[in-house]
Amino acid sequence: MLLYKTVVGINKQLNKLITIPFPELEMGTNSVTKAGELMAAKGAQKVLIVTDAMIHSLGLTTALCNALKDQGIEYVIYDEVKPNPTIANVAVGADVYKEQQCNAIIAIGGGSPIDCAKAIGAKIVRDKPVRRLAGKLKIRKKLPPFMAIPTTAGTGSEATVAAVVSDPSAREKFAIVDPAILPDVALIDPTLMVGLPKSITAATGMDALTHAVESYIGTYHTPLTDKYAIQATEKIFKHLTTAFEDGHNLEAREQMAIASYEAGCAFTRAYVGYVHAFAHQLGGMYNIPHGLANAVLLPEVLKLLKPYCQNRLQLLAEAIGLNTAEDFIVAVTELNKTLEIPTSFPELKAEEIPQITRRALSEAHGTYPVPGYLTQAQGEALLTKFVTKE
């Protein structure tokens, strides 16, 4: 525990020394039509569009492509990104960028295409094996002009300095963390989110809530991150259920998109915690979507952490019109029920719980400013709750 506190203390001091900028923000209905002129202003001549097959097949790239054409900007589409982007996705994307002689990048999609595009940019300017880009401050070179266009309201990746990549051979995930990979422009258009399936709306919305909550209860929080986290939490409790039940409600979609961005601004400065540490391992081991893993884990992790951050949880409760820390945890649990979030992971194997826990605690204790310390036994007991009963 002393080593953990020492590592967190060192990281906290380093965090204070790192200036994290904000992306240029373009927001509003049909704002995607401005993508061409925004990229032209950045000097883009040929753009690598990073997305996934579903986004492309749904036609969500069409307006973007038309906006680029209107400005005389060429483009090539790389749509092979997996739900948890892999080392191979990054390497292939970087090869396409070079072979097609691109000079700019646009990511359009959820957190996976945006994280993949960040890692592609990192590999372009630091031509090393993707695994060697893992860690903090390994890039330190300006990426090509880079725009992120989220099509989900959850990851906040358009506002963060991190990208998470999967290593399928090791069945684990790793992060690239550097202000250099922050997008130059975050373009948020709620019209791109109206067709999201209910399950994705739910999982990504709870992902955003997890970002807000973990940044708020962690020990790196500041007045600025508190402001963003509270604002995001208020919006999510007010608008997520509406967005889930009526996906064509543009007001709810826009408010959730803003909440996701605000939560991203909070956690890229104040970091996350145990929910993310365990979710990353579950994603790496079983390819469970990140937002879904966060959603399932969040209320149970908060129950464990309540003794360490009761006052902070009470402040979150008050922000949404409740009174106590316990009220807030109950509200999260009830929101999960409304959103039809499951309460277990069918993929989770009991015999692999010790390994998953070790990896999760290693990630959390080496990086995240968690409010209290969990042991291996507590972590294993936590995961055991999510094993599907026969």
Image (cartoon, rainbow, N blue to C red):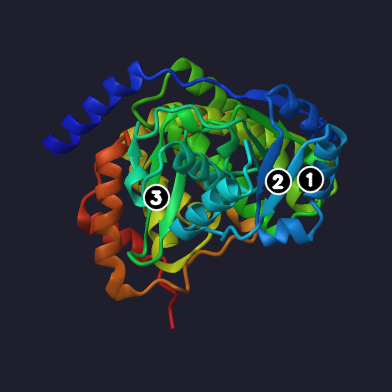
Disc 1 marks a residue whose amino acid type is Leu
**Which of the two labelled residues, at mark 2 and mark 1, occupies the earlier sequence position?**
2
Q: Where is residue 239 in the image (x, y as percent from the top left)?
A: 72, 39
Disc 3 + disc 1, Cβ < 8 Å: no
Instruction: Identify the residue under disc 3.
Output: 130
Looking at the image, the residue that sits furthest to the left is 2
Measured Cα–Cα span from mark 2 to mark 1: 5 Å
Q: How many labels does the image show?
A: 3
Disc 3 marks a residue whose amino acid type is Val
Q: Which of marks 3 and 1 is in front?
A: 3
Q: Can residue 108 be seen from the camera position used here? A: no
Disc 2 + disc 1, Cβ < 8 Å: yes
Indicate the quadrant where residue 14 lies. Answer: top left
Q: Can residue 235 be seen from the camera position used here? A: yes
Measured Cα–Cα span from mark 3 to mark 2: 26 Å
**Front-most of 28 and 147?**
147
Q: Residue at x 69, y 52 (%)?
A: 77
Q: Residues within 10 Å of mark 1 (few under 14, many from 20)?
A: many
Residue 151 - label? 2
**Which of the two labelled residues, at mark 3 and mark 2, occupies the earlier sequence position?**
3
